[in-house]
């Protein structure tokens, strides 16, 4: 696979964080009350995208962002945020002290908390992802985040496609031979399944972990995005899909 240029990370992260901070400067919409009694803490709205390798997760995120005006954080951007202390802190600082204290309690109460504490990087990543989802209007790709965030405050989708379809996609995108593409798709599928199983004790293909599962080979990505937006509205109300298409 083609490596990303090292200069890409800083530019992309700053751009997406700037967009996200601008969007969330106004009162949240669509979030659900998750804590009983004072002080209340809200999450969302957010969208998580779990995907088979080569099924088009980034394309779906882009289509959703175009419709909603929300910032997209794929696994690369999330990893970059988790790795860079100053960027990570800028996200965490968006919460007041009450929110930060609540987040620590929330993360420690997850059923797989012990798995997280054994991996410092993953703990940082989950903390950042939780902050983004708590502020809302964020599209988060990969990293098993559908297992972490409260399901009542967002929409969790999974994008699948037949293995041969995904091999053909990789052959075209990366200009690989069929054997090499087949090996790469199988390898990434295996790594993603192991990651979710190891840290979150879930089967990545369990449909109960998602609000909807889509076959990317059966529908145009624009239609998948339209259905996700309709699901978001049905689940969280019309305010959740209010478009924010301005730039910071």
Image (cartoon, rainbow, N blue to C red):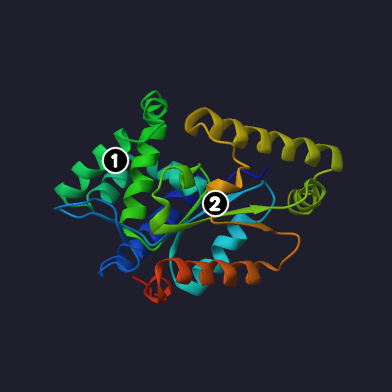
Q: Confirm whether residue 55 shows in the render.
A: yes
Residue 3: horizontal and vertical position, in percent? 61, 43
- Crowd around label 2: few <14 · some 14–19 · many ≥20 (10 Å): some
197 horizontally vs 154: left or right:
right
Residue 81: horizontal and vertical position, in percent? 39, 45
Q: Residue at x 46, y 48 (%)?
A: 77
Residue 31: horizontal and vertical position, in percent? 33, 62
Front position in the image: 8 or 97: 97
Tell me the CA gap for discs 2 and 1. Answer: 21 Å
* The disc label shown at residue 210, or none: 2
In this view, 115 is above or below 173: above
Q: Residue at x 35, y 45 (%)?
A: 128
**Numbered disc 1: secondary structure:** helix
Q: Earlier in the sequence, mark 2 or mark 1?
A: 1
In this view, 233 is above or below 74: below
Specify the farthest residue to the right.
178
Q: Which residue is mark 1?
A: 106
- Crowd around label 1: few <14 · some 14–19 · many ≥20 (10 Å): some
Q: Residue at x 73, y 40 (%)?
A: 185
Q: Confirm whether residue 7 shows in the render.
A: no
95 horizontally vs 216: left or right:
left
Residue 207: horizontal and vertical position, in percent? 60, 48
């Amino acid at each position: 696979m083609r490596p990303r240029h090292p200069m890409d990370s800083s530019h992309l992260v700053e751009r997406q964080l700037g967009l996200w901070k601008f969007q969330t400067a106004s009162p949240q919409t669509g979030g659900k009350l998750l804590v009983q009694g004072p002080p209340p803490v809200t999450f969302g709205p957010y969208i998580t995208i779990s995907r088979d390798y080569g099924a088009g997760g980034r394309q779906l995120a882009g289509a959703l962002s175009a419709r909603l005006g929300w910032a997209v954080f794929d696994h690369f951007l999330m990893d970059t945020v988790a790795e860079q202390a100053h960027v990570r802190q800028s996200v965490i600082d968006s919460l007041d002290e009450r929110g930060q204290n609540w987040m620590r309690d929330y993360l420690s109460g997850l059923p797989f908390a012990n798995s997280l504490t054994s991996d410092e990087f993953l703990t940082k990543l989950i903390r950042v992802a939780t902050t983004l989802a708590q502020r809302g209007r964020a599209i988060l790709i990969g990293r098993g985040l559908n297992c972490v965030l409260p399901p009542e405050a967002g929409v969790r989708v999974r994008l699948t496609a037949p293995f041969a379809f995904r091999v053909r996609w990789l052959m075209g995108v990366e200009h690989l031979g069929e054997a090499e593409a087949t090996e790469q798709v199988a390898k990434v599928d295996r790594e993603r399944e192991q990651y979710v199983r190891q840290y979150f004790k879930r089967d990545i293909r369990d449909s109960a972990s998602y609000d909807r599962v889509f076959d990317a080979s059966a529908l145009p990505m624009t239609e998948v995005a339209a259905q996700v937006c309709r699901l978001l509205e049905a689940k969280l109300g019309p305010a959740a899909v209010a478009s924010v298409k301005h730039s910071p």
